[in-house]
Amino acid sequence: MHISQHQKIASSPASLDDDGLGLALVRARRRRRRIAWLTIAAALAIGAGLFVVQSNQPPQVSIATASLQPVERVLAVTGRVRAKENIAVLPKVTGQIVALTRDEGDLVTAGEILGRIDDARARAVVEQAEAAVEAQARILAQADRDLVRARTLRERGSATEAAVEAAALAVARGREDLRRLEAAADDS
């Protein structure tokens, strides 16, 4: 079928479009879409403007004032320290240490007192050695007197030559014992 005559379409708000909606509704919907797109475009433009403004501003930097102060350096490492040289310090006498004047790792010089040892035992040993020297000196003095007496008696004919030799031998042994005890006393 062919229509030869054109029908006139009414353009009133009540006229319908292809979707069945009124023309006024279509126009209102288009207007809202335009406003929405314009709002989005404006928001993007404002955001871009703010970004440009902030990126052109110099960055904020915190300020610190420098001043002269002592600096403490801390070295935290794990390992072992070995001395270049080790020296063993040994006392001449044994005993209990009653006082230390230096700590481990301190620098010391030759002859410096590092500590004090209880010297009661050492004093006792020295006193014994001195007493032994004195006793031997008395024994030697007695042996010298015996030798003089034996020689005098020999000259008078009352003693034998063997008695004089025994007295002389006692003096020699007494002198040797005295030297040995004096050396021991000097060592203690």
Image: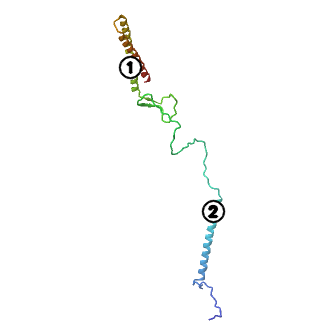
In the image shown, does 138 or 43 lie closer to the viewer?
138
Image height of 183 relative to 108, above or below: above
Q: In which quarter of the image is the C terminus?
A: top left
Q: Name the residue under label 2.
A: 51
Quadrant of the image occupied by residue 168 = top left
Residue 115 is left or right of residue 167, and the answer is right
Q: Residue furthest front?
A: 161
Residue 76 placement (x, y as % from top left) = 52, 45
Q: Which residue lies furthest to the top in this view?
A: 156
Question: How far apart, in angstroms, are the residues tagged by discs 1 and 2?
Answer: 107 Å
Q: Name the residue under label 1.
A: 132
Q: Is residue 27 among what the camera can see?
A: yes
Image height of 23 relative to 69, above or below: below
Residue 13 is left or right of residue 181, and the answer is right
Q: Which type of secondary structure does the marked residue at label 1 adopt?
A: helix
In the image shown, does 44 or 32 lie closer to the viewer?
44
The residue shown at (61%, 77%) is 30
Image height of 93 relative to 27, above or below: above
Residue 146 placement (x, y as % from top left) = 36, 11
In the image shown, does 37 or 187 lie closer to the viewer?
187
Amino acid under disc 2: Phe
Quadrant of the image occupied by residue 99 = top left
Amino acid under disc 1: Ala
Q: Which type of secondary structure does the marked residue at label 2 adopt?
A: helix
Image height of 129 relative to 58, above or below: above
